[in-house]
Amino acid sequence: MERKRLGVSSLTWVTQPLKDAVARAHELGFPCIDLGLLNGWSEFGPEALAADFHSYADPLRAVLEETGLQTASINAGFGSTSDPVSLLEQTHAVCRAASSFGAAAGVTLPAPPLDWDAEKARGYLQPLYDVFMVHGVPMMLETHYGQWTQHVDKAEQLLDWFPQLQLTLDASHYIIQGLKPPDWEALMSRVGHCHIRPCGEQGWDTVQTDPEASSPVVLDWVGRMLTADYQGLFTLEIIEGFNAVEAEPAALTMRERVLCIDEKGV
């Protein structure tokens, strides 16, 4: 893989200020970063941006400009927020942030919970989707265990409802279910961004592992992406403090393995 296509998530340093995560990614030689802006988890999220956009966005944009690090995408999360007005305000804010930071792939949001029925899931997403269309910013939903996108057929249903919707493909959430790349091939034409994570094949408890314990399907999937029509970016999403994995060393190990993949495979 070309080095310029492989970035890292700020969640690798989620306990640190976002500007420090950007600086560290730059120090380690990553060309781009997936910015995790998640309410109640990262330093700040959409709620803070909606309340005081420039106080939060301007310092982060400044360090991005100073380091020359490209924003691959924004990984946004609303947490437990359920008020429709607040959700719309926060959606406008993350769209503004995507434009301000020059997010190449747009914004990733969580898909609706898996136990929601179709009417509730579509009704929740429609106003958010409409905001993205007004801003002209790509809206992506992540393939994620426990959400509608856990199942390929439900992910397809979302894509049918919203013609401009794209996916952030995190194959770890399929690999842990025992699935292989052909099983999610139907989604490939709508993938706008990719998260790479070392994982196992034995359910949720193995969704993030040390690279040495990772399923070979992870690198096989990335190799298949490189031989397909996917032209977007990849970011390593190995989360600090999750499953006892040392996130930064794991990200550096995975980077070397992924960079060794070429169009002929691993």
Image: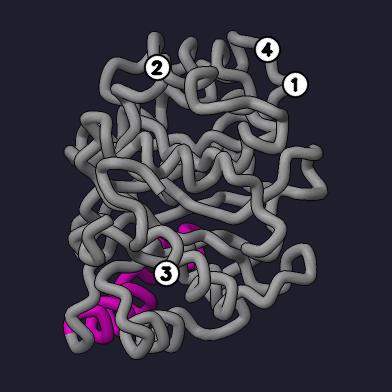
Q: Is residue 140 above or below residue 156?
A: below
Q: Earlier in the sequence, mark 2 or mark 3?
A: 2
Q: Nearer the viewer, residue 214 or 232?
A: 214
Q: Earlier in the sequence, mark 1 or mark 2?
A: 1
In the image, which disc is placed on residue 115? 1
Mark 1, residues whose alpha carbon is within 10 Å: few (<14), some, or many (≥20)?
A: few
The amino acid on which the numbered mark 2 sits, given as a three-letter code, is Leu
Q: Is residue 137 above or below residue 16?
A: above
- Give the secondary structure at mark 4: loop
The amino acid on which the numbered mark 1 sits, given as a three-letter code, is Asp
Q: Which residues lie in the magenta part?
A: 45-65
Q: Is residue 58 magenta?
A: yes
Judge depth for marks 2 and 3 and give the one in front.
3
In the image, which disc is placed on residue 159? 2
- Give the secondary structure at mark 3: helix
Q: Is residue 56 magenta?
A: yes
Q: Nearer the viewer, residue 126 or 201?
A: 201
Name the residue beneath numbered marker 3: 256
Q: Earlier in the sequence, mark 4 or mark 3?
A: 4
Residue 101 visible in the displayed image? no
Judge depth for marks 4 and 3 and give the one in front.
3
What secondary structure do most residues of the magenta stretch adopt?
Answer: helix
Name the residue beneath numbered marker 4: 117
Quadrant of residue 119 in the image? top right
C-alpha span from label 4 to label 2? 16 Å
- Which residue is painted at 60% across and 55% down in the image? 198
Contact (CB < 8 A) between labels 4 and 1?
no
